Image: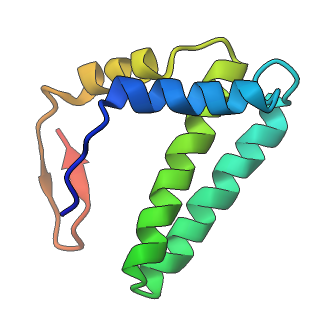
Amino acid sequence: MMKHTTSTEDLFESVRQWADDRKLIDNGNPYMQMLKVLEEVGETAHALVREKTAETEDGIGDSFVTLIILAHQLNLDPMQCLQKAYDEIKDRKGYLNEEGVFIKE
């Protein structure tokens, strides 16, 4: 596994700056950005099914990038979005069924 030298906060900020430099935040269309999110998630699914590890990793990263940009277009803090989601699941209990799907209690 590759060692990470950049903090999560720095990466989120780097993505925001990259998008801002390209006018994707102020001039972007969140509906079109959502389509980009779905495109990247679809590409990730395609790579996963074909067991293409490098392409799956790239797709997951691209999905993160598109979601970070979408959050900023909507004037949301992606770190706060992630924190809110984690706060909802951190104490969740459940079990993994026979198909490998987590079923919450």
Q: Residue at x 33, y 30 (%)?
A: 8
Direction from residue 90 to residue 7 in the image, left or right: right
**Quarter of the image holding residue 89?**
top left
Q: Residue at x 56, y 42 (%)?
A: 65
Direction from residue 35 to residue 71 in the image, left or right: left
Q: Residue at x 51, y 70 (%)?
A: 45
**Quarter of the image holding residue 83?**
top left
Q: Residue at x 62, y 58 (%)?
A: 40
88 or 82, nearer to the observer: 82
10 or 70, nearer to the observer: 10
93 or 60, nearer to the observer: 60
The N terminus: image quadrant: bottom left
* Position above or below: 39 against 24: below
94 or 83, nearer to the observer: 83
Direction from residue 68 to residue 30 in the image, left or right: right
Q: Position of residue 4 (x, y in %)?
A: 25, 46
* Position above or below: 100 against 91: below
The C terminus: image quadrant: top left
